[in-house]
């Protein structure tokens, strides 16, 4: 916050946003002994990963966590593991193995979209963070994932949520506390001022850290372009006149009509205002279910 | 590049008493600058007509908020619009006192503020409180909008009287508004369009013109260099051997080669390099940069210190200071309780020494004498940090004196240190004096014990960076001394942490309390005639001095293990890193003989 105030007029918006995010990363790393960063493999959390390397001078000194619903578009998993090897990331994967083995999912397992999200993402995330469920960790020596049990419980979770993305996310703080049941009290949030955030927390609670809160969709793409950050090709039109604007599970994610074949095309497209009245997550069907959508999900722990 | 992208961005907060017209103003500004989604205005007008309600611009904002929950990207607290000069983010700060924490969070992001006052209702409690908060947050560009002029008959006299009254209040807070504008947000007068027909007597700019006329705050680069050390990294993976001092430059600038000092420790070095990942090589850093430096010399500094340039005025270092404080906590701030202080990148324990005065919440002018600081109070008080902190005298570099107070895991207070007060008589030394004055000695004296045990008592403190190596060495010393027939006991850090310190594991003042308890434990055990050995990793000079004081009248021997360990620690013995336990034990044994704790012939 003060980062904004403190920046020189000549510093670009991207420079300011980068400096602010880096500051938040360093604050999180200093304050939380058991820190993890969620990496959904999408554009936002990939920018987040890049910013972590900026903050720690090329290193990523905490594990990354991906909740694999098994319904992710296969290209996402391929890209994930490629980056894990390339940047030698400490990668953890969590999954609701039981729900999957019982085939409880949308649409064929009789679950609604929201119930499916709750089981495969929210619950999987909660139990992976607390280490209640076993999780898989990438072993660079053998080049594959190995199951681990009784790992550490994470008390600080870095998330790539942006305020402009969706209504409920604009109520977040940079450091947002969650209680034992991952409950989020939106009406009583901690004050944030002068680079000071809520970094003290009662046993059993955890804090979500949002270094990307002030970034917009356009900022993200401009930064990807400026820094030449590798992102999955799903965001680009492969010649069929369609591309993904937001990535999720295959059954619930729809591409948008677009001929943008690269980062520059996407930036140009966003600037035309083509999507200015269309929510970025409009291709994500679960947001529209039951009226409450994402806020309902987020209250119970969805990221 | 697109023209839009070259526009600079500015955050402006809109504050004021509840119902003084914040939402109407923002709705009007959005509508008159065509910043609304297509068809929105018509839609809201139609809804009003259907419900036989007069249309209000505030409904626009409500409608946008409603839509938000359905997924359209408009921010509740933040509204975006642009003029030919800039992109603006208007922060809609809640006026209700229950949401004061949100209001502060929103306002802290702003570079300028619009303060709304209802021409009819006049200056209300929150008009004053928000004025005070703007002043405390350091927002210098404040513009007062006198709203609902239509209901006041566009009366110049009423406007002038209100301005004069409010200006005299703001002057007490050292706020000098850049402008007073008479407006009618509802009718859109002097907002985006002028109100010359209704208020021909007003010749100043409209709200929109005023927005574009705002200037960015004076360059922070011109102030002295201040860099709170957020953290110190040594990531060894991939053969990386850099020791990087990371943080965000608050003010000023620095270049490679500049001589720098750290405060409060006073240690000195110079900048060897500016580090960055995936960026062009840099030779310096300035205000706002999230930077990283390596130093020309090996220096042991803890995160939290403030780095400053030696060719510029240094910050003040002190423990006791006078401060302005704003309290948000549900429980009041009271004397005798320990809080956590966060100032810059530093953290530590804090106590309220004295409340000098509390501003009256209703008029914010008269003062009350109170013993505690209640919720929403604004107080001037004397605070004391357990260990020294670095900040600048108010009026020099405002930014370093800003702090927050944590009570029971929550940020409960925010304040600014105004000046350092005399702290020659520390709380610890006062405590020790009082304790020793009342100390009940038994019939067995220290000399009796020494004669019986064949050696004097002593507190041996091991410190360094490697906690594992320290624990091993401490254990070896205990064993060797015991085998030689001495009464030696090693309190293992892990045992102390799980037992004596179990209840402070999550306390805000954990480190300071841990040191205090260790000091008291040492006092008792050395009193029992033993050689008491323990390790405290990463102890700094202040920790050692505190332990020394707490252990008095008995004495302490400090053994430092490892090269990068704090060289300023007054150590009696320094062992290089990697010293094997046997060599370490012999060196300590020699030290104990030199200090006449044990005698030659006893070995």
Image (cartoon, helix red, strand yellow):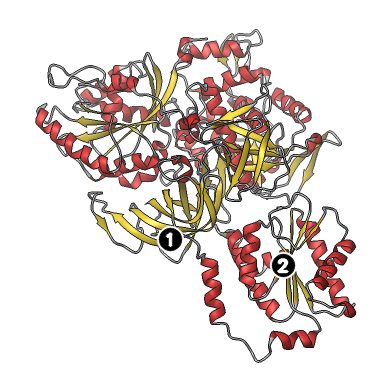
Residue at 11% x, 31% y is B152
Q: Chain of mark 1?
A: B
> Is residue B251 depicted above or below B47 in this figure?
below
The residue carrying mark 2 is: B495
Identify the mark nearer the N-term, 1 or 2.
Answer: 1
The residue carrying mark 1 is: B352
Residue lying farthest bottom? B443
Is A97 on the left or on the right of A12, as rendered? right
Expressed as whole percent of the image width and height from the top left, the position of residue B425 reads 50, 65
> Is residue B72 depicted above or below B355 in this figure?
above
Give the SS element for disc 2.
Answer: helix
Q: Which residue is more in the foreground, A77 or B112? A: B112
Q: Which residue is more in the foreground, B204 or B395? A: B395
Q: Which residue is more in the foreground, B442 or B311? A: B311
Query: Could you tell me if residue A157 is visible in this image?
Result: no
Residue at 88% x, 77% y is B600
Q: Chain of mark 2?
A: B
Q: Quadrant of residue B555?
A: bottom right
């Amino acid at each position: 916050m003060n980062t904004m105030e403190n920046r020189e007029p000549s510093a670009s918006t991207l420079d300011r946003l980068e400096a602010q995010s880096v500051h938040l990363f360093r604050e999180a790393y200093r304050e939380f002994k058991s820190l993890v960063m969620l990496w959904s493999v999408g554009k936002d959390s990939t920018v987040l990963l890049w910013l972590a390397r900026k903050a720690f001078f090329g290193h990523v000194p905490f594990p990354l966590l991906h909740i694999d619903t098994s319904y992710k578009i296969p290209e996402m998993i391929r890209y994930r593991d490629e980056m894990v090897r390339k940047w030698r990331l400490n990668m953890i994967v969590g999954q609701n193995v039981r729900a999957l083995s019982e085939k409880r999912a949308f649409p064929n397992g009789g679950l609604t979209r929201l119930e499916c999200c709750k089981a495969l993402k929210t619950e999987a995330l909660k139990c992976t963070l607390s280490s209640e469920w076993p999780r898989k960790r990438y072993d660079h020596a053998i080049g594959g994932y190995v199951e681990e049990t009784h790992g550490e419980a994470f008390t600080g979770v870095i998330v790539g949520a942006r305020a402009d993305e969706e209504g409920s996310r604009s109520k977040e703080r940079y450091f947002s506390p969650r209680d034992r049941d991952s409950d989020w009290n939106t009406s009583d949030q901690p004050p944030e001022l002068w680079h000071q955030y809520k970094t003290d927390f009662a046993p059993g609670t955890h804090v979500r850290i949002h270094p990307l809160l002030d970034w917009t969709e356009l900022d993200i793409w401009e930064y990807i372009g400026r820094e030449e950050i590798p992102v999955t090709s799903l965001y680009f039109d492969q010649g069929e006149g369609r591309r993904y604007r937001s990535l999720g599970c295959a059954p619930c994610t729809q591409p948008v009509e677009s001929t943008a074949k690269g980062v520059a095309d996407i930036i140009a497209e966003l600037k035309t205002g083509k999507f200015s009245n269309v929510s970025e997550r409009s291709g994500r069907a679960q947001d529209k279910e039951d009226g409450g959508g994402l806020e309902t999900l987020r209250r119970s722990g969805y990221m | 590049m697109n023209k839009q992208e070259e526009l600079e961005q500015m955050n402006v907060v809109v504050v004021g008493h509840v119902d003084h017209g914040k939402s109407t103003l923002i709705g009007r500004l959005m509508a008159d600058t065509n910043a609304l989604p297509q068809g929105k205005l018509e839609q809201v007008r139609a809804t009003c007509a259907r419900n036989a309600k007069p249309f209000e611009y505030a409904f626009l904002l409500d409608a946008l908020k409603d839509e938000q929950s359905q997924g359209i990207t408009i921010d509740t607290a933040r509204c975006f619009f642009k003029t030919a000069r800039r992109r603006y983010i208007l922060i809609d700060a809640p006026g209700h006192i229950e949401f004061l924490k949100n209001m502060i969070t929103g306002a802290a992001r702003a570079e300028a503020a619009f303060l709304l006052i209802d021409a009819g209702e006049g200056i209300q409690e929150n008009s004053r409180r928000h004025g005070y908060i703007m002043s405390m947050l350091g927002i210098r560009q404040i513009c007062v909008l006198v709203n609902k002029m239509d209901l006041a008959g566009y009366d110049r006299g009423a406007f002038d009287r209100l301005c004069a009254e409010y200006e005299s209040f703001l002057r007490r807070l050292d706020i000098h508004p850049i402008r007073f504008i008479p407006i009618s947000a509802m009718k859109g007068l002097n907002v985006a369009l002028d109100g010359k027909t209704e208020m021909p007597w007003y010749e100043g700019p409209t709200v929109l013109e005023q927005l574009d006329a705002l200037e960015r705050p004076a360059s922070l680069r011109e102030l002295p260099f201040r860099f709170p050390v957020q953290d110190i990294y040594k990531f060894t993976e991939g053969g990386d051997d850099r020791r990087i001092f990371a943080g965000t430059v608050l003010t000023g600038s620095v270049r490679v080669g500049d001589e720098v000092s750290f405060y409060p420790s006073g240690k000195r070095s110079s900048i060897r390099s500016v580090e960055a990942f995936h960026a062009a090589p840099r030779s310096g850093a300035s205000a706002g940069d999230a930077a990283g430096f390596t130093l020309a010399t090996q220096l042991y500094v803890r995160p939290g210190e403030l780095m400053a340039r030696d060719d510029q005025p240094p910050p003040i270092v002190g423990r006791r200071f006078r401060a302005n404080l704003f309290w948000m906590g549900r429980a009041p701030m009271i004397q005798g309780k320990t809080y956590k202080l966060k100032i810059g990148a530093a953290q530590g324990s804090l106590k309220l020494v004295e409340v000098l005065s509390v501003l009256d919440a209703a008029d914010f002018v008269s003062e009350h004498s109170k013993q505690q600081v209640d919720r929403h109070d604004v107080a001037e008080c004397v605070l004391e940090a357990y260990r020294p902190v670095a900040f600048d005298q108010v009026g020099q570099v405002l930014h370093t004196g800003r702090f927050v107070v944590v009570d029971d895991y929550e940020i409960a207070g925010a304040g600014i240190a105004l000046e350092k007060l005399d702290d020659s008589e520390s709380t610890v030394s006062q405590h020790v004096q009082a304790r020793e004055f009342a100390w009940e000695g038994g019939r067995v004296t220290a000399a009796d014990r020494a004669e019986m045990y064949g050696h004097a008592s002593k507190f041996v403190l091991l410190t360094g960076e490697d906690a594992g190596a320290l624990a091993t060495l401490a254990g070896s010393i205990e064993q060797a001394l015991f085998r030689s027939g001495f009464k030696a006991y090693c309190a293992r850090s892990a045992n102390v942490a799980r037992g004596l310190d179990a209840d402070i594991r999550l306390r805000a003042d954990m480190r300071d309390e841990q040191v205090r308890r260790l000091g008291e434990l040492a006092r008792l055990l050395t009193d029992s005639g033993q050689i008491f050995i323990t390790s405290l990793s990463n102890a700094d000079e202040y920790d050692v001095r505190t332990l020394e004081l707490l252990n008095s009248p008995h004495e302490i021997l400090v053994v430092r293990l490892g090269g990068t360990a704090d060289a300023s620690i007054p150590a009696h013995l320094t062992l290089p890193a990697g010293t094997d336990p046997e060599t370490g034990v012999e060196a300590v044994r020699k030290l104990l003989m030199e200090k006449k704790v044990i005698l030659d012939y006893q070995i």
